[in-house]
Image (cartoon, rainbow, N blue to C red):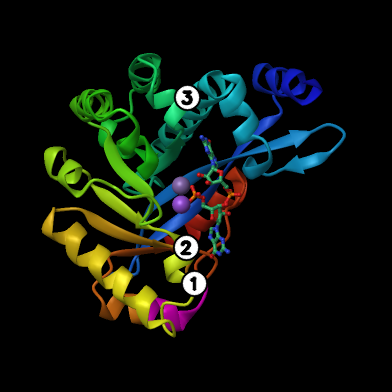
Amino acid sequence: LALEVELRHAIEGDELLLYYQPQTDLASGETVGLEALVRWRHPARGMIQPGDFIPLAEESGLVVPLGDWVLLTACRQIKAWLDAGLAPCRTAVNVSTVQLSRDHLIESVQHALRETGIPPERLELEITESFLMADREHAFRALAELRALGVRLSIDDFGTGYSSLAYLQRIEIHELKIDISFVRDVTTNLSNASIVKAIIALGHSLGSQIVAEGVETQAQADYLRALHCDMIQGYLVSRPLPVEETTLFLKRIG
Ligand code: G
Ligand code: G
Ligand code: MN
Ligand code: NA
């Protein structure tokens, strides 16, 4: 409970911050996207990683105001990078299933777009596969409404759930992110390589682009390029970076 009170305080105060990790196009080598990843700079405990407070935020419902903060902060940052001529094609934010199950999310996205005036296609929402399984009709309506706003949709951790394939036909999904667990030993583990190939073929046949997550070595990148994977994200290119370092990264590659 103490941590919950502290998290509420952190959301209302200025203890949260966003790091950004680049996504690189495998064919052109260009940085085409960023993923925003939240951190909590706790006054006593130091930097807390999302894995250590997002579950609590979800259980307590605090992920709703936290998610609003993430959306608005990311959109303001996109606006600042656009104004500086540095913005990559898109920046993604992670959206919890708890946020998606409430109608409030549509208003939050609308509000962040309206307040900042950024083109909606500059914003991408990463949704986990499990959301698609919970309440299909509700999930479908929610995603259709988000699509109507013009934002991009991405399925995070793809392959770890059991995504209804029929689902992916019903709504335009711009991007599938292959989970790190399949990417880690893709060059040596035949069954993981088969799964990665299947996801790429499936995604492409449905008109989605494919991002491999957690790419750490040049050998993985070369292998994924040979499989026609579109993009990579991972330590090979860059760790998630604080804002100032992200801006320097964008200037360096620009
Ligand atoms: O940054 P890191 O790799 O530690 O992120 C761990 C997990 O936290 C990932 O599953 C990621 O999706 C999740 N996460 C990071 N930022 C956010 C956020 O802003 N909102 C939500 N709901 N999850 C996030
Ligand atoms: O949203 P998602 O669950 O996909 O969050 C991505 C997570 O993966 C973040 O916690 C991020 O810090 C982590 N990550 C990003 N790149 C790499 C990588 O190359 N290797 C490993 N092991 N983790 C990574
Ligand atoms: Mn993600
Ligand atoms: Na992921």
> Relative to residue 166, is residue 75 depicted above or below?
above
Instruction: State the mark number for residue 184.
Output: 1
Decide which of 128, 40 is in the foreground and name it: 128
> Relative to residue 179, is residue 3 depicted above or below?
above
The residues bearing labels 1 and 3 have C-alpha atoms spaced at a distance of 33 Å
Q: Disc 2, ligand 2: is the CB inside 8 Å? A: yes
Name which of mark 1 and mark 3 comes first in the sequence.
3
Indicate the position of residue 189 as horizontal and vertical percent values: 43, 81
Q: Which residue is mark 3?
A: 72
Q: On the rendered structure, is 136 left or right of 234?
A: left
Q: Is residue 218 magenta?
A: yes
Residue 134 can be seen, yes or no: yes
Amino acid beneath label 2: Ile
Please state, as top left, top right, bottom left or bottom right, where the N terminus lies in the image.
top right
Q: Disc 1, ligand 2: is the CB inside 8 Å? A: yes
Q: Is residue 128 magenta?
A: no
> Residue sitting at 47 percent across and 33 percent down?
74
Q: Which residue is mark 2?
A: 180
Indicate the position of residue 156 as horizontal and vertical percent values: 39, 48
Outermost right residue: 44
Name which of mark 2 and mark 3 comes first in the sequence.
3
The residues bearing labels 1 and 2 have C-alpha atoms spaced at a distance of 6 Å
The answer to whether mark 1 and mark 2 are in CB contact below 8 A is yes
Q: Tell me the crowding category of disc 1: few under 14, some 14 to 19, or many 20 or more residues within 10 angstroms, Cα based.
A: some
Secondary element under disc 1, as helix, strand or loop, is: loop
Residue 128 can be seen, yes or no: no
Q: Tell me the crowding category of disc 2: few under 14, some 14 to 19, or many 20 or more residues within 10 angstroms, Cα based.
A: some
